[in-house]
Image: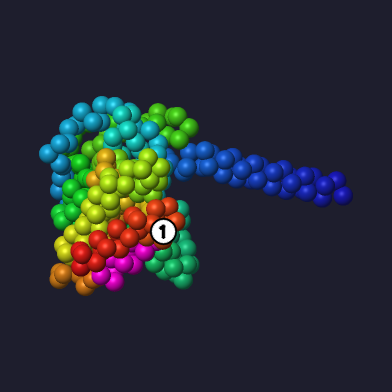
Amino acid sequence: MDAKVLILKKLFLSFLFCFAALCLYTFCRSQTDGFTIAKIRSSPSFSFSCPPKQAEEFSPKIFEQPFFYLGSGAQTFAFVSEDGKYVLKLFSHHKGRHPLQGIAFALPPPWKKRLEATVAKRERRLINNFNGYAIASEYFFDESGLLYLHLAKGNELQKTVTLYDKIGVVHKIDLDEVEFVLQKKADLIYPTLALWIAEESLEKSEQALTELVALLHTRGRRGIYDKDPDLETNFGFVDSVPIQFDTGRFKKSSALDPRTSTEELIRITDRLCQWLDEKCPPLADHVRKTVGEES
């Protein structure tokens, strides 16, 4: 009987230990938003062919200031510069990996095959994200607010940047050793328009919305298709000039994209127009009129 009690105690303590470890991991992950240096480092086998590209206004001195954690997206961790002008995006390479990859050789064939298929799918998703930014680099550079594109390791910059994560821990990153994108920081479309409407800056709003529709039309004319054209989360204004800062889902067509039709522009701007119908109907009418003129 005593032996059984001892075994039960050991099992209970083991359970408590595992539960505490899980709670600690969950807490740390929530506090840091999952960011770690290991997650932004690509594996030695990872390769993406794309030469670095920089805007005329880019200066390496930008990286002499610290960057602070801003948030995470589907494929990147984002940090904003101390002066609030720039966003540094570091790719989440861990999303292209699987925790069981290291023991794949020891798994039964059906499990190994399934694991390899999962890893391949994750790697394709990561490469597709890189392709999207490469397309933006070649065909939509200024319109996406790009300042520096670094999709392959090299030794061009020879710069180290200081990052502060979500809980204020400092990280020093050799920029030549990671893949990243530097962009102008944009203010999101909806909050910015809400501010302008509250300030009764209707003329400024109309001009910005006209340029936003023109941006969408330009993207289509250049044969770029976006699988995720969400104006609320993927677009913003730099001062009052619109940009699309999330280009990870860009696809390139060899011909003019038929989605540049009036119907497609209406679809992309429909939610915005509905929001403007409630906030400022004249601006909603302006967008609809501009869409018709752009077609």
| Residue sitting at x 18%, y 54% | 140
Q: Is residue 143 left or right of residue 129?
A: left
Under mark 1, the amino acid is: Asp
Observer-nearest of 19 and 204? 204
Which of 30 and 223 lies nearest the eye of the viewer? 223
Identified at 25% across, 31% down, the residue is 63
The residue sitting at the right extreme is 1
Image vertical order of residue 120 relative to residue 61, above or below: below
- In the rendered view, tell whether residue 255 sits above or below residue 16: below
Residue located farthest toward the left when viewing the structure as drawn? 56
Q: Can I make out residue 124 in this image?
A: no
Local crowd size for mark 1, using a 10 Å CA cut-off: few (<14), some (14–19), many (≥20): some
Residue 24 image point, x, y percent: 59, 40
Q: In which quarter of the view is residue 120 placed?
A: bottom left
Tell me if I can see residue 293 in this picture: yes
Residue corresponding to mark 1: 277
What is the total number of numbered labels drawn onto the structure image?
1
Identify the image's colour scheme: rainbow, by chain, secondary structure or one colour: rainbow
Q: In the image, residue 141 lies at what x, y percent? A: 18, 50
Q: In the picture shown, does residue 252 fall above or below 166?
A: below
Report the residue at 28% width, 34% height from top.
85
Q: Which residues are magenta?
A: 262-272
Q: Is residue 213 left or right of residue 1?
A: left
The quarter of the picture where the C terminus appears is bottom left
Is residue 264 rendered magenta in the image? yes
What is the secondary structure assignment of the residue under circle 1? helix
Q: Main secondary structure of the magenta part?
A: helix
Write the residue at 40% across / 39% down: 70
Q: Position of residue 273 (x, y in %)?
A: 37, 60
| Residue 144 % position (x, y) | 23, 49
Q: Nearer the viewer, residue 291 or 154?
A: 291
